[in-house]
């Protein structure tokens, strides 16, 4: 390629392709229009030359030609391609984010990197800014599954945008199972203190955590807990592990059906968790379910509210969920108060850097 470039005679875009002869000197005082053929041809030549040779000159390639997000290579990156790239031993760790959640994504990733599991992480981006930002900093680790959601609508808990955001979760997870992969799903307002995979004992279909704050004995049952006063259990839909079995796929399909039965409305601001619990309870006899140990996977309503319990179970905690609190700033403050806002001192350990 370099030899070709040296042999090729280049047109000088700064030279006048129509030199003025002496006989035209009488017209030299005429004003030159920027729309004249001479000027337009020169500008066109300059743009073409810079567009072709800017990569070899070290100039930004998007200085003169900008591409729409829809035609970026990451806009055509498929879930199948992403899973092939990311999964390890047929297993992937997945989170789902929109742009407002990127700081929490970074914090969550740091904690996973400390457990040396970051290479298994696939970020499902719900908007193009998130897709491009993650893949710019960490190529191949983010994918977008259409349709695209409104960037700003999904961050307020209880809003219709938040419901639409979380209601896509079972659909995304089902697609992964149907491609033959096991998947661990996490919300990004979590932090890993240890590797959770040793706790996925046996070959159950679905693993999950209790969202109740009542203290369980250390040797508690791993069966689905009994219904509460709303007629269903209180299992958290924010930390789930699923194997690509018929039972796990059944739960996700039933979860989607339950979401259709309880849509969001202004009077009933639903979220996806009740539907997940109904799906578990109604299909408990058909599916092999496993409740993870409370001491290892406590809800935020227990961990951040009961200092005595935290002290008694010290050394047993694996993933801490920063729930039972609403608002980005409040969540960040609570993480900071407990030393869990890792981006303050460990940003260089994230695959995304300082983001």
Image: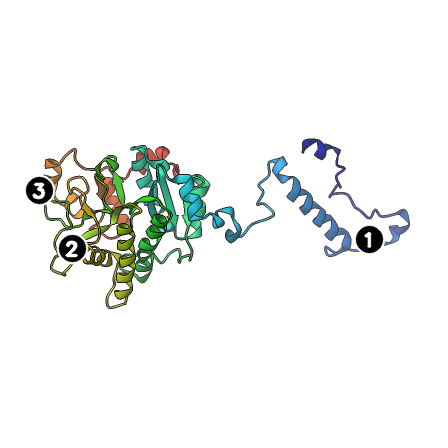
User: Against 173, is 315 above or below?
Assistant: above
The answer to which of marks 3 and 2 sits earlier in the sequence is 3
The answer to which of marks 3 and 1 sits earlier in the sequence is 1
Q: Is residue 263 visible?
A: no
Say whether residue 176 is left or right of residue 74: left
The answer to which of marks 1 and 2 sits earlier in the sequence is 1
Which residue is more in the foreground, 169 or 133? 169
Disc 1, SS: loop
Marks 3/1 in contact by CB < 8 Å: the verdict is no
| Residue 167 falls in image quadrant | bottom left
Residue marked by disc 2: 233
In front: label 3 or label 1: 3
Tell me what residue is drawn at x 16 percent, y 35 percent.
316
Which residue is more in the foreground, 278 or 63? 278
Quarter of the rendering occupied by the C terminus: top left
Instruction: Check the image and name the residue furthest to the right.
Output: 23
Which residue is more in the foreground, 341 or 323? 323
Question: Residue 119 in the image: x percent, y percent?
Answer: 37, 36
Question: How many residues crowd mark 1 within 10 Å: few (<14), some (14–19), many (20+)?
Answer: few
Question: Residue 41 in the image: x percent, y percent?
Answer: 74, 51
Disc 2, SS: loop
What mark, if any, has residue 217 been given in the picture? 3
Question: Residue 98 in the image: x percent, y percent?
Answer: 37, 51
Q: Is residue 275 visible?
A: yes
Residue marked by disc 1: 29
User: Against 273, is 53 above or below?
Assistant: above
Question: Residue 188 in the image: x percent, y percent?
Answer: 30, 45
Disc 3, SS: loop
């Amino acid at each position: 390629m370099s030899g070709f470039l040296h042999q090729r005679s280049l047109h000088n875009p700064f030279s006048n392709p129509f030199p003025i002869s002496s006989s035209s000197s009488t017209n030299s005082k005429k004003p030159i229009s920027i729309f004249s053929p001479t000027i337009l041809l020169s500008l066109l030549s300059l743009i073409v030359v810079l567009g072709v040779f800017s990569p070899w000159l070290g100039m930004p390639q998007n200085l003169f030609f900008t591409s729409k997000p829809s035609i970026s290579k990451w806009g055509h990156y498929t879930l199948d391609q992403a899973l092939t790239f990311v999964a390890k031993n047929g297993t992937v760790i997945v989170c789902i984010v929109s742009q407002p959640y990127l700081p929490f994504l970074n914090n969550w990733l740091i904690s996973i990197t400390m457990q040396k599991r970051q290479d298994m992480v696939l970020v499902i981006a719900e908007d193009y800014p998130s897709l491009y930002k993650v893949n710019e900093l960490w190529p191949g680790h983010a994918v977008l599954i259409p349709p695209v959601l409104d960037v700003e609508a999904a961050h307020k808990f209880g809003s219709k945008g938040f419901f639409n955001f979380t209601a896509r979760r079972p659909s995304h997870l089902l697609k992964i199972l149907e491609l033959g992969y096991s998947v661990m799903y996490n919300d990004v307002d979590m932090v890993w203190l240890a590797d959770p995979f040793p706790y996925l004992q046996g070959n159950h279909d679905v693993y999950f955590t209790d969202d109740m704050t009542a203290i369980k004995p250390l040797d508690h049952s791993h069966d689905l807990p009994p219904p509460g006063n709303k007629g269903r259990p209180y299992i958290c839909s924010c930390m789930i592990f699923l194997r690509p079995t018929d039972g796990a796929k059944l739960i996700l399909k039933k979860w989607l059906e339950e979401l259709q039965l309880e849509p969001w409305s202004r009077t009933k601001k639903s979220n996806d968790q009740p539907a997940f619990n109904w799906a578990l309870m109604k299909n408990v006899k058909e599916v092999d379910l496993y409740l993870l140990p409370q001491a290892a996977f406590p809800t935020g309503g227990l961990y951040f509210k009961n200092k005595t319990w935290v002290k008694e179970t010290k050394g047993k905690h694996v993933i801490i969920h920063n729930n039972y609190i609403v608002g980005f700033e409040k969540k960040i403050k609570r993480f900071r108060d407990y030393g869990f806002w890792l981006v303050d001192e460990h940003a260089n350990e994230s695959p995304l850097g300082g983001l």
